[in-house]
Image: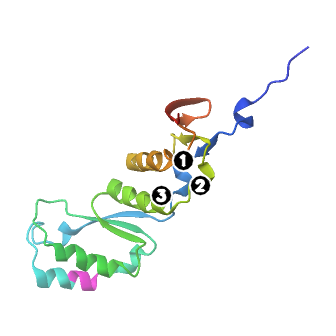
């Protein structure tokens, strides 16, 4: 006689939070402004403004754009502002920095707006493996948002989680 196998994970009150489920759609693009500098180093205002005016900004429609300079040029603050204003009608988000910093800002904004009340007094697993580029900052912020309300917080998968926090 065989005993019935009981799935204790499925029957538990354990709730999983997978950051990849809230990953927003849209291409991530790096925009290197050094391409518009004389020899990649010198910003000439009139030429820079002309390139910005002539550039096809519509190609960034519904994209997330990270502005950066790959050279050691000293870039005046207004240059990033000018480009961001040209991108504003098309891009979903524009930041200064690399793509990881862009993702971090995107997730910070999403998590700040998220209602976490459904996780109150529940054991929560923050799903670790993701098929999307989730920045480490997003996991840290999520844990901080859950700590005041969750009964416990674990990281990983239901079958192999690492306990992180348990309310006393």
Asked whether disc 1 touches disc 2, contact meaning CB atoms under 8 Å apart, the reply is: yes
Query: 53 or 22, which is in the foreground?
Result: 22
| Badge number at residue 15 | none
Dot 3 crowding, Cα within 10 Å, few <14, some 14–19, many 20+ = some
Residue at mark 3 to residue at mark 2: CA–CA distance:
13 Å
Chain part drawn in magenta:
51-55
Task: Provide the secondary structure element on which disc 1 rests.
Answer: loop
Q: Which mark is residue 149?
A: 1
Tag 1 near tag 3, CB within 8 Å: no
The image quarter in which residue 38 lies: bottom left
- Going 32% across and 56% down the picture, which residue do you hit? 101
Q: CA distance from mark 1 to mark 3?
A: 15 Å
Q: Tags 3 and 2 in contact by the CB under 8 Å rule?
A: no
Identify the main secondary structure in magenta: helix
Q: Residue at x 22, y 81 (%)?
A: 51
Residue toward you, 30 or 168: 168
Which mark, residue 117?
A: 2
Q: Residues within 10 Å of mark 2 (few under 14, many from 20)?
A: few
Which one is earlier in the sequence, the residue at label 1 or at label 3? 3
Question: In the rendered image, which residue does mark 3 sit on?
Answer: 111
Percent coordinates x, y for residue 142 in the rendering: 47, 49
In this rendering, position of residue 56 left or right of residue 130: left
How far apart are the two marked residues, 1 and 2, measured between alpha carbons?
Answer: 8 Å
């Amino acid at each position: 006689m065989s005993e019935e196998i009981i799935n204790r994970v499925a029957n538990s009150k354990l709730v999983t939070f997978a950051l990849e489920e809230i990953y927003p759609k849209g291409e991530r693009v790096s925009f290197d402004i050094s391409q518009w500098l004389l020899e990649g180093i010198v910003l000439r205002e009139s030429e820079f403004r002309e390139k910005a005016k002539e550039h096809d900004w519509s190609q960034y429609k519904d994209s997330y754009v990270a502005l950066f300079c790959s050279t050691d040029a000293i870039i005046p603050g207004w240059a990033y502002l000018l480009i961001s204003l040209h991108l504003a009608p098309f891009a979903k988000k524009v930041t200064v920095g690399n793509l990881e910093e862009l993702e971090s800002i995107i997730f910070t904004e999403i998590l700040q707006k998220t209602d976490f009340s459904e996780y109150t007094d529940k054991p929560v697993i923050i799903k670790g493996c993701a098929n999307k580029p989730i920045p480490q900052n997003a996991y840290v912020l999520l844990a901080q948002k859950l700590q005041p309300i969750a009964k416990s917080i674990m990281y990983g998968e239901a079958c192999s989680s690492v306990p992180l926090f348990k309310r006393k």
